Amino acid sequence: MKKELIRKPTGTLDILPEDSFKRRHIELELCQIFSIYNYKEIRTPAFEKTELFKRGIGDYTDVVSKEMYSFHNNEFTLKPEMTAPVIRAYIENNLDNLPGLVKLFYISNMYRHERPQAGRYREFCQFGAEAIGSDSYLIDVEMISLSTKILENFGIKNFITKINTIGTPIERKDFLKDLKKFLEEHIDSLTETSKNRLEKNPLRILDTKDKKEIEILKSAPRLYDYLKYETKKHFEAVLNLLQRINVKFEIDYNLVRGFDYYTSTTFEIISDELGSQNAVIGGGRYDNLIEELGGKPTPAIGFACGIERLLYLMERNNYKFPSEEPLTLYIVTFDDETRELAIKTLIKLRENNIKCDTDYQNKSVKAQMKEANKINSEFTIVLGDKELQSGKAFIKRMKDGKEFEINLSELEKINFSKYREL
Ligand code: AMP
């Protein structure tokens, strides 16, 4: 009886060769961009102690309270985001001893037990950057302009960069009290999610997508009005410089992000082309996180971008991905003797970086020619009885069908350029 097929877990992706090739292109481009901006790559484990995320991201956030893949009696968790692991590694490896600002980037898979939908997966890939050690508005501007540069570099045109400042937990204290009071007056109109957030994470209610709540929030107290002078001054400096360097943005006073570590500047880049999960990049300052995780007080800022959403936008915008180089040569064989000659030839050609292949499934000559055509091989050579006896074969240029005679003794050192030009 045929065995039942075991399928991949819900919310995960098989990234097949065509998509892998595109992702590899994105990764190589990213490495180049980050290098120009002087960011260096960091890799951290796929899983961390659960406590890192609880303390770093916050117990009452969606990610920590319901989306973590934890195991071994909850001791470990597959990473749902990368800022906390990067900061853990920064502290643990004394990266503060490095000269200057510590600028790091990563490309890595993340895991969140979310409800899967278009653009939202349980295993997804993020790249991002963290700049650790400066409270200057200049680095906020660099992060935001780098984020937009990356999207532009990948041919994405229609996006909106939203910016806000959310101050520190101390600055937010009075605001949260007033916000709660205000929302309690409208409790009957709130969604169940917001009712649940009211006690534990009221700030997140500002992030609602519910139309009725958005309307109510228009008359709610505004966080910005509660922030201290220095925080507002920092924000103004960021906005002014962004304007001067022609980075387009919109201020969104209700933009709060999903993690508790954010302080001061927050930003998100959205695109209408993405549907309901419309954010492609999210980031902000997290000036208290390093101290919170056991390091010295150190200001920092970062952003993360989802590769699946980026790829979707690139494809929608008809980004011209490079195409994979086709085979230079496919050798068509006839029997074991010619197959062995083909293998010996291929080994030598590959030593000279020639991309070449042959048949390993004892297919008919006709089927092999069909395959060579289908995979777009530049040249083919048929090796059969006749060729073995005469010591000569024909190399066929597939684009125009022209054939050139060669000696079998030449096979291992074929000059393909010659046959391209003839
Ligand atoms: P976050 O880490 O939640 O701030 O998200 C940063 C970016 O990662 C988002 O703007 C998305 O592009 C991407 N992202 C977050 N969660 C998911 C998910 N479940 N599936 C796919 N991409 C995601």
Image: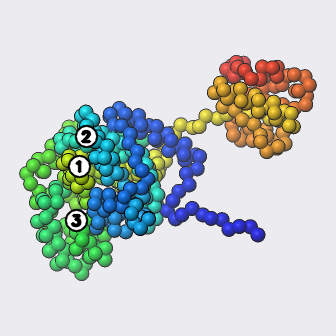
- Tell me the tag on residue 96: 2
Quadrant where the C terminus is found in the figure: top right
Task: Give whichever of discs 3 and 1 has the lower sequence position.
Answer: 3
Where does the image place residue 124, in percent across and percent down from the top left? 45, 55
- Residue 295, label in figure: 1
Q: Nearer the viewer, mark 2 or mark 3?
A: 2
- Where is residue 317 shown, x and y percent of the image? 45, 46
Label 2 environment density (alpha carbons within 10 Å; few <14, some 14–19, many ≥20): some
Instruction: Out of 416 and 251, give the one closest to the viewer.
Output: 416
- Give the image location of residue 173, x and y in percent: 13, 64
Q: For numbered disc 1, what is the local secondary structure?
A: loop
- Above or below for 62 versus 36: below
Q: Earlier in the sequence, mark 2 or mark 3?
A: 2
Give the side of residue 250 with respect to residue 393, left or right. Answer: left
Name which residue type carries label 3.
Leu
Tell me, yes or no, if residue 339 can be seen here: yes
Q: Nearer the viewer, mark 3 or mark 1?
A: 1
For the residues bearing labels 3 and 1, Cβ distance under 8 angstroms: no
For numbered disc 3, what is the local secondary structure? Answer: helix
Residue at position x 16%, y 55% in the image: 167
Front residue of this view, candidates 343 and 10 = 343
Farthest residue toward the left? 229
Q: CA distance from mark 3 to mark 1?
A: 26 Å
- Badge number at residue 355: none
Q: CA distance from mark 2 to mark 1?
A: 10 Å
* Residue 73 picture quarter: bottom left
